[in-house]
Image (tube, grey):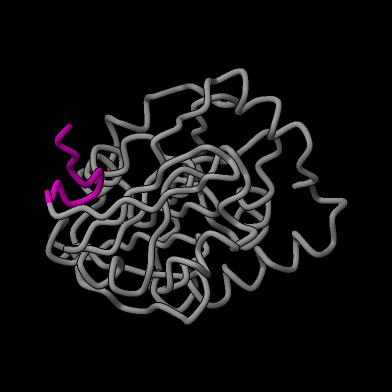
């Protein structure tokens, strides 16, 4: 069976077999994106998310988002206040924190905030935290987000970058969440510039990338 990368559509793919969890992951040799052969249902995703404590009461979670705002949004947003929080979750904490800083924020979540009017607007900033690893069709989703960015606007996202070694990947805690089905690396982030015609402004060694649409 022919397998193509879900991010760049490349056809040079290696299989990573997880015998313990009876799953196969596919590693794209072109862009280094890793994707799972098993995709959860909406019901399975809802059940998994119900165990998360992503709320304003979770001090550690709020501090993580405040750091994301300070490092991945504020330095690149200029005077823009028009933001889309894509994948806002059951409690849109990031949206709340951004509004407190004077941003005009619209939220979207395929489960918890399904209003798709955002598709017909243009944004100066699109943010997505701990969302891209859940995307079943990452190319299509990211392409749509880029399309609704204004010129010189930014796309900032946060997702854990996968280890380069396959054995380390199989032992990696982050992939054990069954709703995590796609994994990026530094190479993937760099390749996204060509895939989506973006300019990479920032990425760290852990989980943050910032792009500009020229």
The majority secondary structure of the magenta stretch comes to: loop
Instruction: Please tell me whether residue 183 is drawn above or below residue 138 in the rendered image.
Output: below
Q: Observer-nearest residue: 192 or 64?
A: 192
In the rendered image, residue 68, in percent from the top left (x then y), is placed at 58, 69
The C terminus: image quadrant: bottom left
Tell me: 212 left or right of 161.
left
In the rendered image, residue 10, in percent from the top left (x then y), is placed at 12, 51
In the rendered image, residue 183, in percent from the top left (x then y), is placed at 42, 56
In the rendered image, residue 114, in percent from the top left (x then y), is placed at 50, 22
Q: Observer-nearest residue: 158 or 37?
A: 37
Q: Observer-nearest residue: 47 or 204?
A: 47
Place residue 61 in its image quadrant: bottom right
- Segment colored magenta: 1-11
The N terminus: image quadrant: top left
Q: State yes or no: residue 2 in magenta.
A: yes
Q: Residue at x 53, y 59 (%)?
A: 170
């Amino acid at each position: 069976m022919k397998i193509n990368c879900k991010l760049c559509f490349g056809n040079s793919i290696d299989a990573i077999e997880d015998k313990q969890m009876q799953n196969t992951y596919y590693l794209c040799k072109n862009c280094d994106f890793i994707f799972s052969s098993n995709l959860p249902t909406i019901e399975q995703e809802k059940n998994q998310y119900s165990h998360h404590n992503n709320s304003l009461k979770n001090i550690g979670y709020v501090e993580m988002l405040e750091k994301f705002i300070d490092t991945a949004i504020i330095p690149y947003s200029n005077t823009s206040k028009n933001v889309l929080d894509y994948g806002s979750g059951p409690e849109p904490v990031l949206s709340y924190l951004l509004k407190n800083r004077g941003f005009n924020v619209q939220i979207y979540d395929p489960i918890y905030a399904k209003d798709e009017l955002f598709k017909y607007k243009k944004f100066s900033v699109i943010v997505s935290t701990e969302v891209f690893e859940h995307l079943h069709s990452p190319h299509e989703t990211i392409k749509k987000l880029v399309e609704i960015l204004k010129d010189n606007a930014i796309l900032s996202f946060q997702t854990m970058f996968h280890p380069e070694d396959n054995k380390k990947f199989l032992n990696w805690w982050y992939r054990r969440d069954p709703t995590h089905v796609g994994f990026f690396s530094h190479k993937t982030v760099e390749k996204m510039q060509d895939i989506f015609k973006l300019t990479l402004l920032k990425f760290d060694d852990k989980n943050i990338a910032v792009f500009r649409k020229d």
